[in-house]
Image (spheres, grey):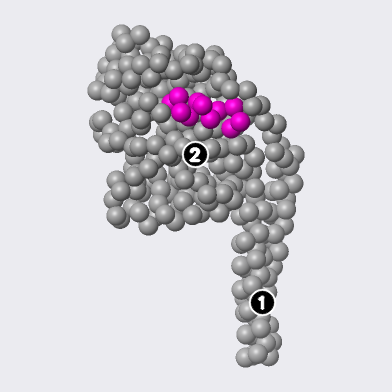
Amino acid sequence: MTPDINTDGPGLVSIIIPAYNEENAIVETIEQVRAVMSASQYDYELIIVNDGSTDQTGEKARIAGARVLNHEVNQGYGAGLKTGIVAAQGDWIVIPDADGTYPNERIPDLLSEAGPNDMVVGARVGEAAKIPLIRRPAKWVLAQFANYLAETKIPDYNSGLRVFRKDVAKRFFKILPQGFSFTTTITLSSLCNGYRVKYIPIAYYERTGKSKIKPIRDTYRFFMLILRTTVYFNPMKVFMPISFILFSMGIAKLAHEIYTAGGLAETSVFLILASFQMAALGLLADMIDKRL
């Protein structure tokens, strides 16, 4: 069911920046965000979530005048965002990164599209050129898989610069992960539930400091994340294609067995039964989803 759309634009905007060992970039990021927002028409609050940093990130952010929330130990990017969202006073959330890779000067452009849209995402232009060649095929396959399951083209599923309604995030709090996949999950969850998501092209810069992304591990986790999120919200999209493939294989195998051997074999029966089981699982999961 498509959610009710509140077209009111942002009042107070809560800007939340999780930071872990970003002492070399955090002050510049705070100053840049403040300059951009002070020149805009929007009222805002700036929250830095110091996610268990072992350097001077938290202290530098405090001296720079930001409101700082502290995690005693590192809990993850998503955990930092959740802490900030719970503490936020605004109805709209803005999330830039602490490392200087996103054009914070575009925040007002994203906010200008809020209201009719429930989420506005800065879609990175030119990011593909920065991805190593060996990683591009896997990233392309994952992107196509995400597009299929979400039933729409997603220009950038894990951009770290976006604006969204606080109540949308809170609706999905129990499934939003603690790590970097927070952004991907809230994107897929919003799309699968009929929320309006708009993409605005933005530039993307080289980060300050060392990247915390682990390509092989995070690619696997991303694949499983897409699968789990879709099964949670639209299980028929996953189970029915599998059921159709198994049924087609079973019928083809059955026809071959009858033509060549004049009888049935266990393989064809197994495939056909498995296809019915998958269809039944899909229907059951869909009924459970409708009751949640």
Crowding at dot 2, Cα within 10 Å, few <14 / some 14-19 / many 20+, comes out as some
Q: Which mark is residue 199?
A: 2
- Residue positioned 64% across, 56% down in the render: 239
Residue 211 lies, with reference to residue 35, above or below; the image says below
- Residue positioned 69% across, 68% down in the render: 273
Which residue carries the number 1 mark?
A: 251
Residue 211 covered by magenta stretch: no
- Residue positioned 45% across, 24% down in the render: 108
Q: Is residue 101 visible?
A: yes
Do the CB atoms of the residues marked 1 and 2 lie less than 8 Å apart? no
The magenta region covers 107-117
Residue 107, x across and y down, in percent: 43, 26
Cα–Cα gap, marks 1 and 2: 44 Å
Residue 15, x across and y down, in percent: 45, 20
Residue 110 covered by magenta stretch: yes
* Quadrant occupied by the N terminus: top right
Badge 2 amino acid: Tyr
**Viewer-closest of 147 and 126:** 126
Of the image marks 1 and 2, the number of the one nearer the N terminus: 2
**Viewer-closest of 270 and 94:** 94
Crowding at dot 1, Cα within 10 Å, few <14 / some 14-19 / many 20+, comes out as some
Residue 276 lies, with reference to residue 112, above or below; the image says below
